[in-house]
Amino acid sequence: MSTRTVIRGGLVITASDEVHADVLMEDGRIAALAASGTPAAEAFTAERTVDATGKYVIPGGVDAHTHMELPFGGTFASDTFETGTRAAAWGGTTTIVDFAVQSVGHTLREGLDTWHAKAEGTCAIDYAFHMIVSDVNQETLKEMDLLVEEGVTSFKQFMAYPGVFYSDDGQILRAMQRSADNGGLIMMHAENGIAIDVLVEQALARGETDPRFHGEVRKALLEAEATHRAIRLAQVAGAPLYVVHVSATEAVAELARARDDGLPVFGETCPQYLFLSTDNLAEPDFEGAKYVCSTPLRPKEHQAALWRGLRTNDLQVVSTDHCPFCFSGQKELGRGDFSKIPNGLPGVENRMDLLHQAVLDGHISRRRWIEIACATPARMFGLYPKKGTIAPGTDADVVIYDPAAEQVLSADTHHMNVDYSAYEGKRVTGRVETVFSRGVPVVTDREYTGHAGHGVYTPRSTCQYLN
């Protein structure tokens, strides 16, 4: 049975255009667009009509970096695929790309199957997977080829966390060489984990145990050094590179230099680096533990370089690295030892709103907002134009956004399964009103109308910036 919905009178914003248009959705896809008030638009007929006058009509957000149910630091990320995708929908995100994890001694397939089992039948919105590669060997390299063929086309490696996810330069080079051949994209957590561990040990020996020291030992120079090394290894391998959660001025400079040299190198940052700083890590009474993530929050002066990188396209994507741990019982594991605080922040629900606030603050344009939050992540990870834009034939992942509504971000009102907000008390202008996922309303006039299991697994093509 055909279901048709028309959204009338809104300002449709994509990465390339802004136009007052009516949008016709049918059977989960965008069927047509026509300028509002024209005969073509008036001819649209549908069972449901939504009035978007005075509102923005934007593509659903694509968050290409989340960690639902991630085991880490002796505990688990507090959002399940069910709670995390529901919160994402509330925040105007309609697709997440989460990270399946290969454990050392296990195959990529075992890790991927585990994550499929966690997510299947529980998600409110569509989802896909990257693969964390923790154990590079001949079998792993062969498996990478198979995963690319079936739509898992990106692989994350870590220069940090020795003994957990860490890969040495030789392992990284082998994986990059493989991705150069199979079309996959290596994503890099670029921090010099070996050196950081020395600084952690020395800080704890001096009795420097508070959360703020987490930021002080994970030095910006060690992020920049690892970023430089990852770029050069990728250059040797002839492979593209995507550096995740870039936080430091010096790391942005490494990416800019590589891109100026014509290398296929890409960078992502996250809202926490754009809006938070070491001032938060230094909050008293262990409150700073709420803001422990890696890469760490930096002094405020780094924010200008990140915003500039987003404007100049030396940084292409804003993802959340959503990896929430409750303050009570989880972050508290690190009382008396910052190195035992689980690393990660909640944010999947806040990204679209914070970036809209950045538009109002003059950091980015409206179209750039959609580009860095919807279109580019979809292109980067092989989901475009199915996801990330509004055009005939695309999935009807559409958000009606009220640019004038004011809200205060708070744990009292958010839908993420975590007992604090990283942005508690922050006032922002702009709010999601209604969200469609493949034409189905999952949030309707600020009421949740979705359900677990609506979201489906979405295989991906290879990075569309390399074709």
Image (spheres, rainbow, N blue to C red):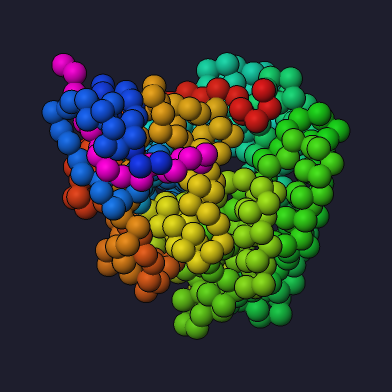
Residue 292 showing in the rendered view: yes
**Percent from the top left, x then y, of residue 243?**
67, 45
Q: Please name the predominant secondary structure of the magenta segment in the image.
A: strand
Residue 200 lies in magenta, yes or no?
A: no
Residue at left offset 70%, top offset 68% = 217
At 50% across and 66% down in the image, what residue appears?
361
Task: Tell me how many marks there are.
Answer: 0
Q: Quadrant of the N terminus?
A: top left
Range shown magenta: 1-18
Above or below, 202 relative to 17 = below
Q: Is residue 194 above or below residue 158?
A: below
Residue 99 in sight: no
Residue 449 placed where, x, y %? Answer: 19, 42
Q: Is residue 8 magenta?
A: yes
At which x and y percent is residue 137? 72, 27
Out of 284 and 297, give the one closest to the viewer.
297
**Which quadrant: the C terminus?**
top right
Residue 133 placement: quadrant: top right
Q: Residue furthest left?
A: 47
Horizontal arrangement in the rendering, residue 438 relative to residue 461 (left or right): left
Relative side of 173 to 391, left or right: right
Give the image location of residue 249, x and y in percent: 72, 62
Question: Residue sitting at 59 percent across and 34 percent down?
Answer: 380
Q: Residue at x 65, y 26 (%)?
A: 184
- Compared across the picture, whether 329 is left or right of 263 comes to left
Drawn side of residue 466 relative to residue 28, left or right:
right
